[in-house]
Amino acid sequence: MKVSRSMPEKIVTLHPAGKAGVNIDKQKYDTVREAILQSLQDNGMMTFKDLAAEVRRRLEGSFAGSISWYVTTVKLDLEARGEIKRVPKSGSQRLVIS
């Protein structure tokens, strides 16, 4: 009997500046996306630094991989998809749910 080993589902991310996206594991994407959106929903406008720290706090110990890399990558994708946006002229990069 042949055992089927399915490859993890992948997603190609988007970039708000139209640059090439990256191919990442969809389950990790979904986990980080949910943590980003929940953090912004719970806290309102956040700086990118605070958002990254909040996502790290939520996922640390239960996430394999570089949380900071995934936060940056998924944040850019969410900006490109219009789910979150940068607040213009706010000094350091501040983000809100669109």
Image (tube, helix red, strand yellow):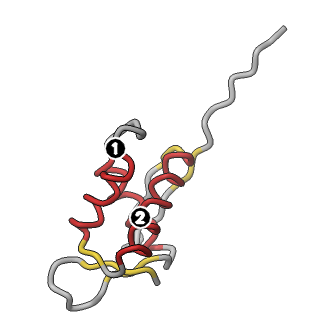
86 shown above or below 29: below
- Is residue 69 left or right of 13 when viewed as pictured? left
SS class, disc 1: loop
- Amino acid type for the residue under numbered disc 1: Glu
Tell whether 44 sits left or right of 53: right
Residue at the image point whose x is 42% and y is 60% from the top: 74
Give the farthest residue toward the right: 1
Is 51 above or below relative to 83? above
Per the rendering, the mark at residue 31 is: none
Most extreme residue toward the front is 42
Q: Within 10 angstroms of label 1, few (less than 14), some, or many (20 or more) residues?
A: few
Three-letter code, disc 2: Ile
Residue in front for this viewpoint, 40 or 68 = 40
> Disc 2 on helix, strand or loop?
helix
- The number of numbered badges drawn on the structure is 2
Between 76 and 30, the one nearer to me in the picture: 30
Where residue 3 appears, as percent x and y from the top left, is 76, 15
Location of the N terminus by quadrant is top right
C-alpha span from label 1 to label 2: 14 Å
> How busy is the neighbourhood of tag 2: few (under 14 within 10 Å), some, or many (20 plus)?
many
Residue under the image location 41 percent in, 73 percent down: 42
| Name of the residue lying farthest toward the top | 1
Q: Which residue is mark 1?
A: 60
Q: Which numbered disc, 1 or 2, marks the residue closer to the eye?
A: 1
Of label 1 and label 2, which has the lower sequence position? 2
Residue 82, percent from left and from top: 49, 79
Where's residue 90, x and y in %?
Answer: 20, 88
State the residue position of label 2.
36
User: x, y percentage for residue 77?
Assistant: 45, 65
Q: Kindly give the residue lying farthest to the left in the view shown.
A: 91
